[in-house]
Each structure stands twice: as C-alpha cells, then as structure tokens.
Image (spheres, grey):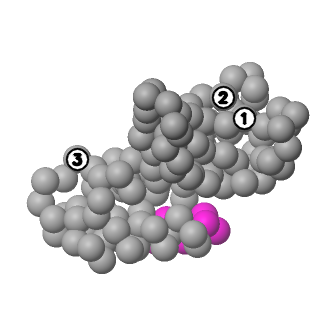
Amino acid sequence: MTALADARSALWRAAECDRSMMRMHYLYRAADALDRAGLPRWAERAHSAALRIGGDDRDMQLLLLEIDCALKSRTGHVVKIRTDFWAKPIPLRQFDWIAIDEDTYDGAPDSHSPIGYGATEAEAVADLLEQIEERAA
C-alpha cells in the first residue's frame, strides 16, 4: 500500500470514529503516512487536527478530497489546492467558495485552468477535483 493510500485509509477511519482518542490515533497515523509520502503541508494539517483531540470534520473532508485526487490523478502530480471565501453581492450562495490548483492557475481572465465553485469549501474542492478528473480523461 502506498503512503497516500495508507493516509487515506487512516483518515477514513478517523472520520468514522466517535471516540476522540481513537480518532486522534488515526489522525497521527495519517500524518505519519503523509509525511512518508513527502507531503509535509498535509501532514501538518493532519497533525494539528490530532492535537485538537478529534480534529475538525471539515479538515478531514478536505484532506480526503485532496488525497483522493492525488491517488486518482492521471497527471501524476499532487494537486495543491487553495480555497478562498468571497461572498459575492448576489443572492445565490453556490459561488461563495472557490478552489484552485496552485500549480496550474495563473489568474488570467482568459486562462483555461479549472476553478471549483461551491456554497461550502468542501463543495468547491469537490467541483475542482471533478473538473481535473474530466480533463485528465
């Protein structure tokens, strides 16, 4: 099993745990696996979630989405996702969060880089990952 797959498994187990000590144990396992995979930024996020005794479900969801994308990525690179919140002056909330791949997004208006949108941060990341998968296929 690769280190990323091991991290994904540990994060899923942490998300399913209702006991905080077991959740903390699985988060530490995930942080260790992410560190072995050469992903110190993700390892630090898992480690800080473990230190909060139980972690934040939102953090775990985002880590899982990013790891899933890295595992499924046909391009062979790990997607570095950045999210931003900006409540637009319109009544619709499904565009409040955006997610981009820091490696491919150049910020140009005519750019063809995928941008994920959503009412929540997790929705925006999921939308971005779906677009990346569609382009890779």
Task: Give the amino acid at mark 1.
Answer: Pro
Q: Is disc 1 in contact with disc 2, using a CB cutoff of under 8 Å?
A: yes
Q: Which mark is residue 16?
A: 3
Residue at screen point 60% across, 29% down: 130
Task: Please name the predominant secondary structure of the magenta segment in the image.
Answer: helix
Q: Nearer the viewer, mark 1 or mark 3?
A: 1
Which residue is at the far left? 19
| CA distance separating discs 2 and 3 | 28 Å
Task: Give the amino acid at mark 2.
Answer: Gln
Using the image as rendered, state which of residue 48 and residue 107 is in the foreground: 107
Instruction: Assess disc 3: are there few (<14), some (14-19) or many (≥20) residues with their C-alpha within 10 Å of its C-alpha.
Output: few
Q: Nearer the viewer, mark 2 or mark 3?
A: 2
Judge whether residue 76 can be spotted in this image: yes
In the rendered view, would you say 32 is above or below 103?
Answer: below
| Residue 37 relative to residue 59: left or right | right
Residue at screen point 61% across, 54% down: 82
Q: Secondary structure at mark 3?
A: helix
| Residue 135 relative to residue 98: left or right | right
**Picture quarter with the C terminus:** top right
Task: Give the amino acid at mark 3.
Answer: Glu
Q: Which mark is residue 114?
A: 1
Q: Which residue is mark 2?
A: 131
